[in-house]
């Protein structure tokens, strides 16, 4: 099977870079990046600076694109936003999702182009949203996949627990058509779901866990295959790992086989420019980072106490970085502040250090965009090494898609009982 890729919400190319580091045979045949409300499209320009400016690198609103014009591909990837995925009935038989909700563009591409494999990334709260109907949004996503003939695995992965330099928790979704060779290989293990969690499934190969017992696995079924009914009624407490096969859901909380994380110290620049140092507002920084208990009044007039715990100030450079946000470098609670080991003075991390935290090459975003937007792009990005691990095992899967013999597990079928 050809390693052809469609990359959605491409940003500065984290998915593509990760796949190409795993295997240069991964070929991106179409990519889309568009920042709404922005006159300057800095992320797209950065993407093109690294991967070329051509007709298949598209800077348009994905919702306005005719999905049939997208080239055929065998792998669809993208980091899509966490939104309200609910649908409403629009007539006697029709249903419609909310405008501007980008999941429906993914769903349309799956329907029109039917790629054999899919990898998507989202925030960890996806599995719990919305707060008043926990698990509904993910249930809608799973229902869409099920309607289109896909099986699905998911895992919340904290990058630092697998050796990377950032404590970044993200939900990763791996889906595959139930007509693939891979599906026929996995099929025989569905009666023993613990095997899929422990050593047979996609994430068991790429991000190993401590063994789980079958008694820890919970299950439910997508009884309703009608998205409007799922929107109204579905609720389920999804754990951090799971899979769906033919509408049957299995989930459990897994514990990673921890790998020593890279500390922030290993990523620091030398001789950092003076503009990154905190020469003022030190007391403001201390306040923002400190514990608080503040009386507030809601819009309805209800009085309540807002509280939050302290954040280390400065951040330890002997640990991996905290989760980097798009507001990195601004005067706010989430921005990293370190004590430079050369000068013993407090400073911000540099754009290059932000790139290293996410696993990009040095100066990846140094393509003419403003410095603040370099931080923004890294806050929006994913940990590239996560994708490289997935791409390595996906190459193994793709190599066997055209073979009649089942996948050779060799040392992989060490089923933990």
Image (cartoon, rainbow, N blue to C red):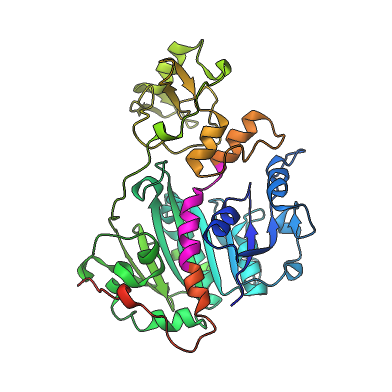
Expressed as whole percent of the image width and height from the top left, the position of residue 56 reads: 75, 60
Q: Residue furthest bottom?
A: 404
The answer, for residue 80, to whether it is visible in the render is no
In this view, the residue in front, 149 or 144, is: 149
Q: Is residue 23 visible?
A: yes
- Identify the image quadrant of the C terminus: bottom left
Q: Nearer the viewer, residue 93 or 351?
A: 351
Task: Return the residue found at the far right.
Answer: 55
Residue 325 vertical position relative to residue 19 in the rendered view, above or below: above
Give percent across and percent down for residue 27: 64, 65
How far across and down, in percent of the image, does residue 155 sit? 40, 59
Q: Is residue 416 toward the left or the right of residue 241 in the image?
A: left
Residue 269 lies, with reference to residue 166, above or below; the image says: above
* Residue drawn at 44 percent across, 65 percent down: 233
Looking at the image, which is closer to me, 225 or 341? 341
Measuring from the top left, give residue 25's x and y in whole percent. Answer: 60, 66
Magenta stretch contains residue 109: no
Dominant secondary structure of the magenta stretch? helix
Classify the position of the N terminus by image quarter.
Answer: bottom right
Up-down relation of residue 275 to residue 85 (above or below): above
Q: Which residues are magenta?
A: 380-393
Question: In percent of the image, x 70 and y 34: which residue is there?
Answer: 369
Q: Is residue 249 left or right of residue 230?
A: left
Residue under the point 56% across and 39% down: 378
In the image, residue 152 above or below residue 46: below
Labels in figure, total = 0
Quarter of image, res 262: top left
């Amino acid at each position: 099977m050809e390693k052809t890729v469609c990359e959605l919400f491409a940003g500065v190319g984290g998915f593509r870079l990760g796949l190409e580091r795993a295997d240069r045979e991964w070929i991106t045949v179409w990519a889309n990046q568009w920042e709404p409300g922005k006159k300057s499209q800095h992320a797209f320009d950065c993407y093109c600076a690294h991967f070329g400016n051509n007709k298949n690198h598209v800077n348009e609103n994905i919702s306005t694109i005719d999905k049939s014009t997208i080239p055929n591909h065998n792998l669809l990837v993208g980091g899509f936003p966490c939104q309200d995925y609910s649908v409403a009935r629009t007539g006697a038989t029709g249903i419609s999702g909310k405008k501007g909700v980008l999941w429906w563009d993914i769903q349309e591409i799956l329907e029109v182009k039917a790629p054999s494999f899919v990898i998507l990334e989202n925030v960890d709260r996806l599995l719990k949203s919305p707060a008043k109907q926990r698990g509904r949004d993910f249930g809608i996503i799973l229902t869409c996949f099920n309607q289109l003939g896909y099986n699905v695995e998911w895992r919340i992965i904290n990058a630092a627990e697998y050796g990377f330099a950032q404590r970044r928790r993200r939900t990763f979704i791996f889906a595959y058509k139930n007509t693939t060779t891979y599906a026929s290989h996995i099929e025989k293990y569905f009666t023993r779901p613990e095997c899929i969690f422990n050593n047979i499934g996609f994430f068991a190969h790429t991000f190993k866990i401590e063994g789980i017992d079958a008694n820890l696995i919970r299950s439910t079924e997508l009884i309703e295959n009608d998205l409007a009914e799922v929107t109204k009624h579905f609720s389920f407490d999804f754990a951090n790992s799971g899979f769906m096969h033919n509408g049957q859901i299995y989930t459990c909380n897994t514990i990673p086989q921890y790998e020593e994380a890279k500390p922030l110290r290993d990523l620091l620049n030398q001789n950092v420019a003076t503009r990154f140092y905190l020469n003022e507002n030190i007391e403001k920084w201390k306040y923002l980072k400190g514990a608080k208990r503040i009386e507030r009044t809601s819009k309805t007039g209800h009085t309540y106490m807002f509280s939050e715990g302290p954040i280390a100030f400065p951040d330890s450079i002997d640990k991996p970085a905290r989760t980097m946000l798009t507001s990195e470098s601004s005067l706010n609670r989430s921005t990293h502040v370190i004590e430079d080991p050369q000068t013993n003075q407090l400073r911000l991390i540099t754009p290059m250090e932000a790139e290293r935290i996410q696993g990009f090459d040095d100066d990846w975003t140094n393509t003419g965009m403003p410095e603040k937007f370099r931080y923004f792009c890294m806050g929006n990005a994913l940990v590239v090494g996560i994708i490289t691990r997935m791409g390595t095992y996906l190459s193994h899967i793709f190599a066997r898609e055209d073979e009649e013999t089942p996948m050779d597990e060799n040392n992989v079928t060490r089923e933990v009982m």
